[in-house]
Amino acid sequence: MNSPKNMIIDTLKGLAVLVLFQLLGEGLAQILPLPVPGPVVGMVLLFFVLRQLPPPTWLISTAGRLISLLSLFFIPAGVGIFFLPEALRQQWPAILAAIIGGTLLSIALTGLILKALTRALLNNE
Amino acid sequence: MSEMFISEPMALLFSASLLALTFLAYFAGLWTFRKAQHFSLLHPLVSSCLLIAALLYSLDIDYARYQRANNVFYWLLGPATVALAIPLNREFDRIRALALPLLLTLLLGTIAAPLCALTLASLFSADPLTLLSLTPKSVTTPIALSIAKEIGALGELTAGVVIFTGVVGAIAGPSLLRLLGVSDERLQGFTLGINAHGVGTARAFDISPVCGAFSSLALGLTGVLTALTLPTLLLWLPKIF
C-alpha cells in the first residue's frame, strides 16, 4: 500500500482528478461567462461532489501534498516584485505603504470585526 | 513550453538549472524556517524569493527567462486550488456553524482591503494608474489579473503587489491577530484568507488544518465577491478621493 510505486500511481490518479475538475471549471466559466477563474469554479464543483460521496484516500493524500507545497508554487511570481518596470520605480513609497500598511490595517479591521461578530457564538461552545 | 524542446540543448540545460534553483531555494528556505522554529520573517517564501532575486541580479539573468523556465509552478497552482475543496469539505460543519458572521465579515473585508490600500497609497501621492493597480491586491493572483484587465489596471504591477501582500499577511498576520486578541484558529484562518489569499492560506495550513480550511473558504469567496463588486465600487470612489 505504501510502496513508492503505489504512491506515484496514487499521486497521478489524484492529479488527474484535480486537473479534470479544473478543466470542467474552466469550461463552465467560459460558457456561463463567470468573472471567476476556472480553478476556483473547479474547487466549488469538487466541493459539491464531495458533499455527496466521500473522497478516496489517494485523493486526500494528493491534495494534502499539493497544499503543503503551495508556498513553493508562488515563488516564481514572488520573485517578480523585484523586477518591476522602470516607470514604476518612483511609485515605490506609495506601493510599499499600500502593501505593508494597507494589508496590516485591513487584517486588523477584518480580524476585529470577525471577533466581535462571532463572540456570542463562540462563547456558547 | 514547446519552444523549450525545439531550442538547443544548452538552453534546455539552462532552463532546467533555473527550475532547480527554485526547488533548492525553497527547500533551503524551508530547512532554515524549521531550524529557526517557524520565525515568521524567515518564511520560505520570503527567503527563497530574496535569494533567487539576488542571484538573478548578480548573474545578470533576465526575469522573463527565469519565469519561463518555472512555468510548471504557475500551472500547478490550478490543481492546488481545486485541491482546497478537500479540507473545505472536511471542515464544512465547523464553517456552517459560523456562516452568518463569516459572510458579514467577508462583505466588509472585500471592501475594506481595497479602501485601506487606496487610503495609504494616496497619502504618498501615488498616480492614478498605480492606485487602480493596487485595488485587487488581496485577491488570489488569477482573479486579480482578470480584474486588473477589466478595470484597466497595470497587470504586471497588480501581480507583484498581490504576491507581496500575501507575503506581508503571512508574515505579520498571525502575530498581529494574536496581539489584537483574535486567538481562535478559525477566525485567524478566515482573516488570512480574506486579506492574504493563497499565500496566507499556505501559512494558515502551517498553523493547523482547521485554520487552513477557513482560509481556503475565505480565499475563494473573497476572489469571487471582489470580482463582482470591485468594478462597481470603483465607479463610486472618485467621489471620495
Image (cartoon, rainbow, N blue to C red):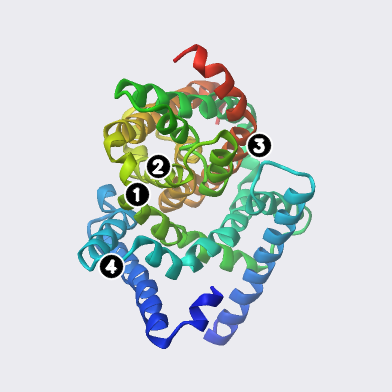
Using the image, tell me which numbered label, if any, was put on residue B146: none
In percent of width and height, residue A14 lies at: 64, 70
Chain identifier of the residue bearing label 3 in the image = B
* Residue placed under numbered mark 4 in the picture: B28
Closest to the camera, between mark 1 and mark 3, is 1
Q: Quadrant of residue A13?
A: bottom right
Closest to the camera, between mark 4 and mark 1, is 1
What's the residue at 69%, 62% (across, down)?
A55
In percent of width and height, residue B151 lies at: 56, 34
Structural distance between the alpha carbons of marks 3 and 4:
39 Å
Using the image, tell me which numbered label, if any, was put on residue B161: 2
* Residue placed under numbered mark 3 in the picture: B96
Q: Are marks 1 and 2 in contact (CB under 8 Å)?
A: yes
Mark 2, Cα crowd under 10 Å, few <14 / some 14-19 / many 20+, is many
Structural distance between the alpha carbons of marks 4 and 1:
21 Å
Chain identifier of the residue bearing label 1 in the image = A
Q: Secondary structure at mark 1?
A: helix
> Which amino acid is tagged 3?
Arg
* Residue placed under numbered mark 1 in the picture: A81
Judge if badges 1 and 3 mark residues of a common chain: no
